[in-house]
Amino acid sequence: MRTTSVPSLACRMWWLTPLLMMVGCGVTVPSERPTSVPETPLTDVSVKAPVARLTNGLAVVRVPGHPGSLRALLVVAAGPADDPTGEAGLTEMAVRMALEGTDRSPDAGPSDRVRALAGDIDVVGDGSVSGWVVSGPEQAASGLLNALTDVVMEPSFPATRIAALATRTRESVELRDNGIIMTAIAVASGVALGRGKPLRLQATSPELGRLNRETIVRHWARLIDPRRMALVVAGGGAEVDRALARSSERLAGLKPPKVAASSGFAACQPSRVSTHLVMNPGSGVDNVFTLIALPAPGRGEPARAQLETALAALATTPTGVVARKLGPERAYHAVPRLLDLGYANGKGAAILLMRVSGPRRVALRELFVVLELLVRFGKEPPAGEMLKSAQHNAASKRAHAMEGPVASLVELAAAALYPVSAAAAAKVNWEAAVSDIFDASSLVVVGVGPVELAPLFKRIGPLSVWNSVGRFVGGEKAPGCKQRAL
């Protein structure tokens, strides 16, 4: 699997497909291409696959796959919410740089070693996990898993390659020029998670200009924590099992960091409804771009399954609630999309994000229609046949996600790193969960435009004003957490 090169960090993060539709990136999803490993879906693999734990806490999952081949995934529970303050995108940059060289082969990175074995290695992630996936023939299992293990155990982080990657990425960010929309998404994400300030999902040009080897090494030392890491291995037979045993022995030598990576907050519901205007003085008032965000149950939350059912009821076209109200074409961007955003101190961070944009009159009408629809949905969740249909659609979507050879391994890793107690999940009440998720007092509305739009957003709730780079410049202070967690 190779990720097609596109202009910015956010555009290269394939788990941000819903977001990329908002910012207009070109290619958004890594292309699954034929390699030496047959692309056999792991449809027979349950997300409840047995999980073994090494002595240091690292999770190991062994599942069936295509005979004669190997596919392995090594990830850490981390995403944008785990980036240090003022260093957005650092987790992704560190993960990418780990493929540039190891102490074992400083001049030939893992990619070169894997290609020599007729295999492939690349970065992978879905917002809740970040890491690497390797694939190739079973007879090369030892070399392939060794290369994957070296990425974590012996990264060399060549300073010249870090500088080159930072320069290329900065040029791409500046060329793309979608900064103000990414600022709006950062405001929506951070406020919806109860931070009271933006949570950037990609590095800014100044941050990339400051990036250096010391910064990455420092973050890596805190990020690589075996207690929040998982190795998932699929395919092959005895040769793969022997290689897995050797790699597990090496990985058991990973020590927990003295100071763990921390975002400094745990995801929660914001304390009140709020509106935000990201200032764009050069834009007119004839076109409006707005985002609606809500906090959502993250990975490992008992209500996650209820959320997936609710999304199926809202987002399915043409029968979903939003499509029936706005029409399939206008509903395409307005339906809620789930974004996982990281580990956030042991509790998966996630939000629901919707976009409403277009000519001012149409967009504002639809904005209020969608807000009313969400509030009503929380008070009167689907029941009867509509609920059964939503549950069926949610189950079908989960099954479809498990058909991709890489996506299925990501799901298995996430299930191991964010376990959900069956007893806790069984206690979740459908109506109560939906009411909690679609709580009107947690709504976050973010608009982009000139100050003339401020009175329109004040009609919804207290207004905070931010400049184009996400600095608070006026209005009401953004809300923090409610006392109770989601």
Image: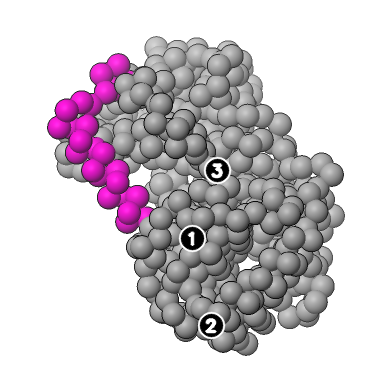
**Element under disc 1:** helix
Q: What is the spatial separation of the Cα atoms under label 3 and label 2, in whole angstroms?
A: 29 Å
- Image point (30%, 16%), residue name: 379
- Asked if residue 164 lies left or right of residue 111, the reply is right
Is 16 situated left or right of 102 in this image? left
Q: Which picture quadrant has residue 150?
A: bottom right
Local packing at callout 2 (Cα closer than 10 Å; few below 14, some 14-19, many 20+) is many
Picture residue at 74% right of the left edge, 60% below the top? 252
Q: Which residues are magenta?
A: 376-401
Q: Is residue 380 magenta?
A: yes
Residue 367 screen position, x and y as percent: 32, 25
Q: Identify the disc placed on residue 138.
A: 2
CA–CA distance in space, label 1 to label 2: 17 Å
Q: Name the residue nearer the viewer: 462 or 38.
A: 38
The three-letter code of the residue at mark 2 reads Glu
Residue on which the image places disc 1: 409
- CB under 8 Å between discs 1 and 2: no
Look at the image and say whether residue 96 sits in the magenta stretch.
Answer: no
Residue 167, position as x, y percentages in the image: 70, 61
Disc 3 from disc 1: Cα separation? 14 Å
Q: Which residue is mark 3?
A: 418
Q: Secondary structure at mark 2?
A: helix
Residue 21 screen position, x and y as percent: 39, 48
- Kind of residue sitting beneath label 1: Leu
Nearer the observer, 188 or 453: 188
Q: Residue at x 74, y 43 (%)?
A: 261
Whether residue 395 is visible: yes
The mark nearer the N terminus, 3 or 2, is 2
